[in-house]
Image (spheres, grey):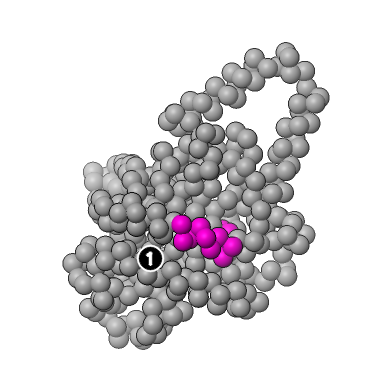
Amino acid sequence: AGQLFLPVPLLGYFRADAGLLLVALACTAAALLPWRRLLPATCVGLAGPMALFAVGLDPPRFRHGGDKPVQVLNGSTAYFVSVAGALSPAECAALVRAVWDVRTSWTHASHAGALAYFHFPWSANFDKGDDPAEAPLWSFSYGLRFLMGHESHHATHPQGAERRAAVAREAKRLFPLFAPLRRALAAHFNTTADRVIFGGDDGGWERLGAPSVQVYLPNMLWHTVHNRHTDAVYVRHLRRYLGGQRFDELRCSAATATSFLLPLVAPAGAGLLYYDAPRGQISENEHRYTVGTLHAFAVWTPHSIRPWPYREWAAGEARVTVQTFGIRCGEWWVMYH
């Protein structure tokens, strides 16, 4: 993604400026503090909880967004379906290798700041058209301006048109590896693969975002973040792309809008939380990820990535998922991001 991210021992991956700062602070503390006296307390106060978190004990969660997203339930039961074996382990591995090979074309999710969270090729959630020339000399979102990489906040700005075209070509080259996903979605919809349209397909869909691969590099902080939200806003992306008149002419039904997630690499503890209220009381439901399982849920279903533990002995194990949104348009299902 045009930037360097460094692994910080016991904490995980950070953008280079933040990682070097953390290492410098640790070295300074090691040089100045009386470690002989503090070592036992340090082991108990830091190493102990880290070990417990690594084996499955959940730390306190930082909730982003509060309870507002779950209020849309109004006592209903959320729709959620999982299809095991939608993609084979070999098909998942081939897609992961291909996406990793084009990592210079990834885009960093700017709202993640110094944490390592990327997507390829596009993200309807995060890509914006802010002017990179207006970025400050340094910011938490981008780091140092003169070292700034490919940021989602600048992804659709006209200055990045040439890069965006190159990323589109890379994505089109990888389309054959997405064929098993197209077949799995067709089976879910009880239709044929030729009735499933991907963003980027020929025939007027070239500018629509394709299904997105999302990559998280390990970090202790991913075990604490709890971002409860819905995907209902992303129905507007297809309407805006098609235009309201064509959206209606194609008989696109917002009521059919569905979110899909498929894990390609699933570290221990990774999964999805979703919420319903069958008896008027909000309940949390948990699905642990297994590689190749397709998860489908209505876009209005409140959900969150399940916080997962950082494990120093598996610090190279990324969390990799495919995400796409689907809407039925007449006899077709349009999949996009």
Can residue 119 be spotted in the picture? no
Residue 209 percent location from the top left of the image: 45, 72
Q: Residue at x 30, y 86 (%)?
A: 249
Q: Residue at x 74, y 42 (%)?
A: 21
Q: Residue at x 80, y 26 (%)?
A: 31
Quadrant for the C terminus in the image: bottom left
Instruction: Spot the residue most to the right.
Output: 32
Residue 23 percent location from the top left of the image: 72, 37
Residue under label 1? 177
Q: Residue at x 40, y 45 (%)?
A: 266
Give the number of callouts: 1
Choose top left, top right, bottom left or bottom right for residue 34.
Answer: top right
Choose top left, top right, bottom left or bottom right for residue 152.
Answer: bottom right
Which residue range is magenta in the image?
A: 97-109
The majority secondary structure of the magenta stretch comes to helix
Dot 1, how many residues are within 10 Å of its Cα: few (below 14), some (14-19), or many (20+)?
some
In this rendering, the answer to whether 242 lies above or below 210 is below
Foreground of the two, 290 or 173:
173
Residue 160 percent location from the top left of the image: 62, 74
Dot 1: element: helix
- Kindly identify the amino acid type of the residue bearing the numbered disc 1: Leu
Foreground of the two, 232 or 168:
168
Can residue 289 be spotted in the picture? yes
**Residue 125 part of the magenta segment:** no
Instruction: Spot the residue most to the left.
Output: 190
**Residue 102 part of the magenta segment:** yes
In this rendering, the answer to whether 3 lies above or below 193 is above
Left or right placement of residue 295 versus residue 156 in this view: left
Foreground of the two, 121 or 317:
317
